Image (spheres, grey):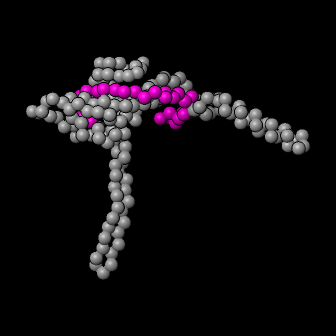
Amino acid sequence: MSKKTYLVVLIALLSVILAGCMPARQTTDQGLTVERKVDESLYHLTIKISSEVDSYSQIHGSLSGAMFNGFGSMSGAIWQDGKGLVRGELLDLSPSVSFAKIGDEIVVKTTDFKIVALWANDTVHLTCTADYEPICSMRTTDGGDVVAGNCEDNWEFDYCRMRGLEPSTNTENPVPTE
């Protein structure tokens, strides 16, 4: 192998090694790139639902059809995708976190569609992740690029799935959330 080829291979190898030493990055809601923070824990929450369960969704689907001599058929599927929001009093939490404590009124994001069937005062058991969502100011560099300025750490419960339910004992006047 020639010295020139050896040097090119060595530089490429060093570049790959040094790139691996860089901290992982993520993009904020504002489109800014910041250092990524990951929490690998799963959190077990018990929440007493205090208000309507709200959800936002997008309807996705595909339909097809055919017609022949006045007769036809149509088939397809439509489904709902998105996250729901659950607001309630945090009754239990394991393990503990710095951004929420027992007794707090919190809002969590869930990917479990069963959540829309909950009523106010139901108690729900959830398993969630903690998601890092930093809030950053913006600044312009001397070169004119917009980059993250000061950032504030913001953690939230996300991707929650329902593990159990204790229905409200108020059977006379249940309050549907939808």
What quarter of the picture does the N terminus occupy? top right
Q: Residue furthest front?
A: 164
Q: Is residue 53 visible?
A: yes
Q: Where on the picture, by quarter, is residue 107? A: top left
Closer to the camera in the image, 31 or 159: 159
- Residue at the image point whose x is 32% and y is 22% from the top: 92
What quarter of the picture does the C terminus occupy? top left
**Where residue 111 sits: x, y (%)?**
37, 39
- Residue at the image point whose x is 17% and y is 34% from the top: 175
**Where residue 141 sits: x, y (%)?**
62, 29
Give the mark count.
0
Q: Tell me if 116 is positioned left or right of 41 in this view.
A: left
Q: Is residue 137 visible?
A: no
Q: Where on the picture, by quarter, is residue 8? A: top right
Q: Tell me if 98 is positioned left or right of 175 in this view.
A: right
- Residue at the image point whose x is 34% and y is 45% from the top: 57
Residue 35 falls inside the magenta stretch:
yes
Closer to the camera in the image, 47 or 66: 47
Residue 9 falls inside the magenta stretch:
no
Q: Residue furthest right?
A: 2
Q: Tell me if 10 is positioned left or right of 106 in this view.
A: right
**Where residue 18 sits: x, y (%)?**
71, 31
Closer to the camera in the image, 140 or 86: 86
**Where residue 84 sits: x, y (%)?**
33, 38
Q: Residue furthest bottom?
A: 69
- Residue at the image point whose x is 35% and y is 18% from the top: 101
Residue range (magenta): 26-53
